[in-house]
Amino acid sequence: MKKILIITQGISRIVRPLCNCSICEVVGLIECAPREVEKQDNIFLKCLKGIHRLVSFKADLTLKAFAANFKIPYYYMTSSSIELENWIRELKPDLIVVYSMSQLLRKNIYTIPRLGTINLHPSYLPEYRGPNPVFWIYYDMVREGGVTVHYIDDGEDTGKILMQERYTIPLGIKSSDNFDIAIDRIGIRLLLEVIQNIEQIEPIEQSMTSSTMRARNLKLNEHRNIIDWNNWPIERVWHVLRGTESWLNALPTPQGIYRGSRWVIGEFEKKQLNGKYKIGSIYKRKARRFVVCRDGIIYIECKINLKQLFVSLIKNGK
């Protein structure tokens, strides 16, 4: 049985399946700090974690708590330090498995295991290399997604490919449902196949050129202008809004008792509108809210989200 070490953020989608499978033993869990953590106030972060725990009512909410429950060694990683290197060497993993990591591993880390270090990437590499590939797949209205398991090297998602698979992305599928397909249904299966057969798989060199843009994280000031309201057909606007419903702030934020909550994107209706409606703006008619597109309307609604409300209040110091 191979000994593996997982590097990820939080209790990601790969953690439980790998910890509960019979083909490998998880000997360590490393939590990779988000890029922005070092720039934020520690007290603020502790407040958010406390609120998150209170409203979630889960004993193993954090990866640290999960690791303690499973009696798996845990490490919080901020960089590829000598301390981290020594910690990993003591565990002697055969393989490191990476998913949803916010920083690049250095050579002193990814070369430690005898079988190397592999990454699960939610695109069909070399397409959409980099962070947040799923957003750009939605943005480009690409209806064929992909999942790749590849070796980690010095580049960003440039290592040799071990396995990959394409799948169809339904129009308007929400990101959580998309990840159910990409990661839960396909990615985990590919990971387990690679872990079990890695010594027999002949890896394939990646092309250094790609037919798509490099994926990247959006800056906060890009959210409101990322949708081309005047030129995009309603199907594309709807597809992007549905796929980014949980995090993109392309619409004016809810106010009043709904402050801190998010818009839930409903169905769309193609229709010709008169000039009194401004494209990209939100209106209310017969108790239903909708956002106006160039060739129709998208219905939206808002539900009070206590967790988001508390976060909003803390951010605004109220």
Image (cartoon, rainbow, N blue to C red):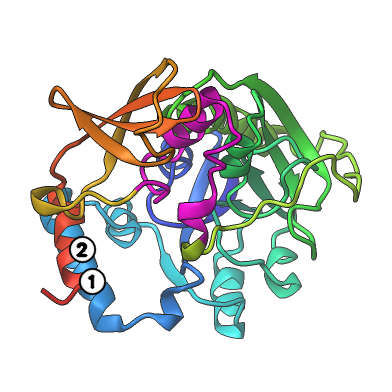
Quadrant hosting residue 52: bottom left
- Locate residue 204 relative to residue 3 in the image: left or right: right
Residue 203 is one of the magenta-drawn residues:
no
Which numbered circle lies on residue 198?
none
- Whether residue 252 is situated above or below residue 244 in the rendered picture: below
Q: Which residue is drawn at 86% across and 40% down?
A: 203
- Whether residue 284 is situated above or below residue 120 in the rendered picture: above
Q: Residue at x 39, y 55 (%)?
A: 10
- Residue furthest to the front in view is 275
Is residue 27 visible to us here?
no
- Locate residue 175 relative to residue 213 in the image: left or right: left
Name the quarter where the N terminus is drawn: top right
Q: Tell me the residue that label 1 is attached to.
A: 315
Q: Position of residue 239 (x, y in %)?
A: 50, 28
Instruction: Describe the element under mark 2 as helix, strand or loop.
Output: helix
Disc 2 residue crowd, few under 14, some 14–19, many 20+, Cα 10 Å: some
Instruction: Describe the element under mark 1 as helix, strand or loop.
Output: helix
Q: Where is residue 183 in the image (x, y as percent from the top left)?
A: 53, 33
Q: Which range of residues does the magenta coloring cover?
A: 222-251
Q: Where is residue 110 in the image (x, y as percent from the top left)?
A: 70, 64
- Three-letter code for the amino acid on which mark 2 is drawn: Ser
Q: Position of residue 90 (x, y in %)?
A: 56, 71
Quote the CA–CA distance across marks 1 and 2: 5 Å
- Three-letter code for the amino acid on which mark 1 is drawn: Lys
Which numbered circle lies on residue 312?
2
Residue 223 is one of the magenta-drawn residues:
yes
Q: Which residue is drawn at 55% across and 58% down?
A: 218
Disc 1 residue crowd, few under 14, some 14–19, many 20+, Cα 10 Å: few
